[in-house]
Amino acid sequence: MMMMLIAAMAVQAATPPAGPPTAARPLKDIPGVTVSYYDVAGKNQKQIKDALKKLRPVGANGEPQAIKSSWDVGAGVQKQTEGDKCTIIGAKVTLEGKVELPRLADPAKADADTVKAWNEYVARLENVAALDFNFVSDRMPDIEKALTGQTCDAASGAMSAAVDRLAAQERGYMASLAPPAAAPQK
């Protein structure tokens, strides 16, 4: 029994902690999302981390906030007017997302281990951003449903309320994910 317990503890210790799940779609495949990059200089992991700290605000965890993202929602509606009553009978909602990610300015000047660690770090950042935008994008039909059937006068308020609900859901979802790994360090 003790041997099984020790073996189980060894397996558990050797298992890396679970990170966030893999995004269903990469950023490039999410409609309405634009990706831009900022250059980070450095030849080794310490220089890169120092450069990130200079370029980005530091979060509560003491690490630079390497990702900057924002989103907004636009809507086109179909109206039907009968007499003096205007009703939204259909809506098409679109996501306008922006994400800014780091890019190693000159990878040829860094050693192979540093480039490998950097690429793994950026892949994790891209995955977290993709999880976020997938979550938001997948909920566009909820906003369309919230608009459909509203009076034309109430549509703006319904849209605002639906977007506020989505923003709250997004905050909860992102908080439920394991935080991305810290900037590469050595």
Image (cartoon, rainbow, N blue to C red):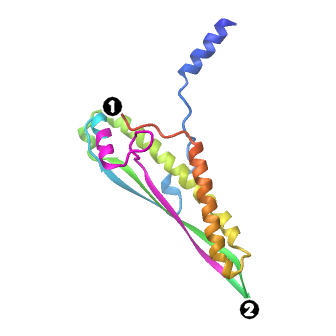
Badge 2: how crowded within 10 Å, few (<14), some, or many (20+)? few
- In the image, taking residue 73 as reference, residue 144 lies left or right, namely right
In the rendered structure, does residue 22 fall within the stretch colored magenta? no
- In the image, taking residue 33 as reference, residue 168 lies left or right, namely right
Look at 34% across and 48% down and name the residue there: 103
Q: Which residue is mark 1?
A: 113
Look at 64% across and 73% down and name the residue there: 157
Q: Secondary structure at mark 2?
A: loop
Look at 66% across and 64% down and name the residue there: 141
Specify the segment rendered in magenta. Answer: 49-78
Task: Farthest residue to the right: give it.
Answer: 83
Work out which quarter of the rendered image holds the N terminus and state it: top right
Say if 14 sits above or below 120 in the image: above
Residue 50 locus on image (x, y percent): 29, 40
Q: Which residue is mark 2?
A: 84
Instruction: Choose the circle earlier in sequence order: 1 or 2.
Output: 2
Locate residue 34: give its quadrant.
Answer: bottom left
Look at 25% across and 37% down and name the residue there: 43
Task: Farthest residue to the front: give it.
Answer: 60
Q: Give the amino acid at mark 2.
A: Asp
Locate residue 21: give its quadrant.
Answer: top right
Badge 1: how crowded within 10 Å, few (<14), some, or many (20+)? few
Residue 79 locus on image (x, y percent): 68, 83
* Label annotation for residue 28: none
